[in-house]
Image (cartoon, rainbow, N blue to C red):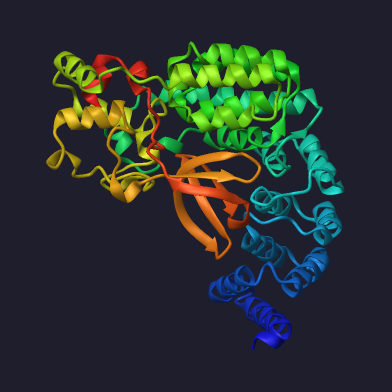
Amino acid sequence: WAPNYREAIDEFFQLAERENSREETGTLHTNAPFENALQTIVSGWRDTATVQELTTQWINTAPKLDQPKQQQLSNLLSAYDHGELPTSWIEPLVNWLEKAEPTTQLSIASQLSNLKLPVSSELNTKLLSLASASHDDVARLQFLAALPIGSAIANPQLEQSVLSALAADEEDQELGSNQTGLELQSDSAENSSPSAPLSNAGFNALQRVRLSPQSGRQLLATLPMQPPRLLSLVVDAISRVGDDALDAELLSQLSQLPAARTLAEEQLLNLYRTRSAALQQAAQATVTSLSRPPSDIQEKIDTVMSQLKPGDPIRGLQLFRSSKVSCSGCHRLGYVGGEIGPNLTHIGSSRTRPALLEAILFPSARLEQSFQPTKVLTHDGQVYNGLITRHMSPTQFMMQLSADKSIVLSTDDVARQEASQVSIMPSGLAELLTLDELSDL
């Protein structure tokens, strides 16, 4: 089959289109098995020139298709997740975006946000144009989130849209603190607020754009109010501005901020690795200050244990699911939560209270064997600490660096790889929680 896979895939695509176009009672029906099978085929052969050429042809014809078929074709782009956008796609994608309906434009932008786009191209210009022209706050941010990382948008109104979305999340945190235990039982409780789509789109846009120094200072002013789950994102965004004075102020504030202890030390060192010698030294000093553990961990545990109260499990559940500590982003409790860290549903039957306290306050003291992190040094000097969650191909793998941050690395880029003794669970929670909150948790 392999020598003829171009014809085979093309025939398969045409067959899928015929099946998808069959009408029953006047309604267009899609055929999910065909779509899923085509997605699998394209994903497996996506790096071959022939499949990329075929995809280019499909994108070229996209504006001539009806709306449901355009939607299916935009979904097919997800087969190239975490890959580099072929340059041959840029012109037809721009043409497609110009002629597509708004819903299809947003679908295309959503898929592009998972691809590596060239830093400068007419596609980026088109995405910025769509963002500027949009009257919908969420849509505007979704177009910005499709830009290459580090894109300067040079538009005060668009920058303000990003910052306003973060402010909406701060309001959600205040509302979330008033939820009852029963409300928190719902899987959707965390994302049920009306502004959740806006704040999520804002986070995604902030990961991509490069703010002006003025907007960077506005963002820096919010640093003390940022929850641990967003602190890493905000620090990245401020450093991306590229203003030495702003970065020096950022590092100075971080060294005094209790929540900054939840940052991974590799993040700060990587951010300033190619900056001025003064900033590199300041970053190293900040990391040293934040990562310094107490001289006697057991003594600290004993001291805190003697101060803990019985605690309230309902309030503890609220805290577990809150943005303040975001435990549920990594840990499952019953049917709710992530799977990046150990399942905690029955943890009380296998761990003592002091052991649980140690795991919360000093997560790197005892690492769970099945969640052993890995440290990777790349040839360009970057250091990453995280869990290898999956191998996407023989030459690519994904690392989970934190609850909401991952990276795809090529084996060709790896200079050294070894087991790490540093957990990806953030430390420093003792500084964020009161004794009452710690008792409840």
- In the rendered view, would you say 346 is above or below 86? above
| Residue 144 is at least partly visible in this image | yes
Residue 132 % position (x, y): 80, 35
Q: Quadrant of residue 139?
A: top right
- In the rendered view, would you say 33 is above or below 372? below
| Residue 318 is at least partly visible in this image | no
Q: Quadrant of residue 280?
A: top right
Q: Is residue 169 left or right of residue 164?
A: left
Q: Is residue 355 left or right of residue 172?
A: left
Residue 347 % position (x, y): 19, 41
Q: Is residue 389 left or right of residue 359?
A: right
Q: Classify the position of the N terminus by image quarter.
A: bottom right
Q: Classify the position of the C terminus by image quarter.
A: top left
- In the rendered view, would you say 133 is above or below 279? below
Residue 399 % position (x, y): 50, 48
Residue extending furthest toward the front: 416
Q: Quadrant of residue 50?
A: bottom right
Residue at position x 80%, y 53% in the image: 97
Residue 315 % position (x, y): 25, 25
Q: Nearer the viewer, residue 265 or 63?
A: 265
How many labels, in total? 0
Q: Nearer the viewer, residue 99 or 407?
A: 407
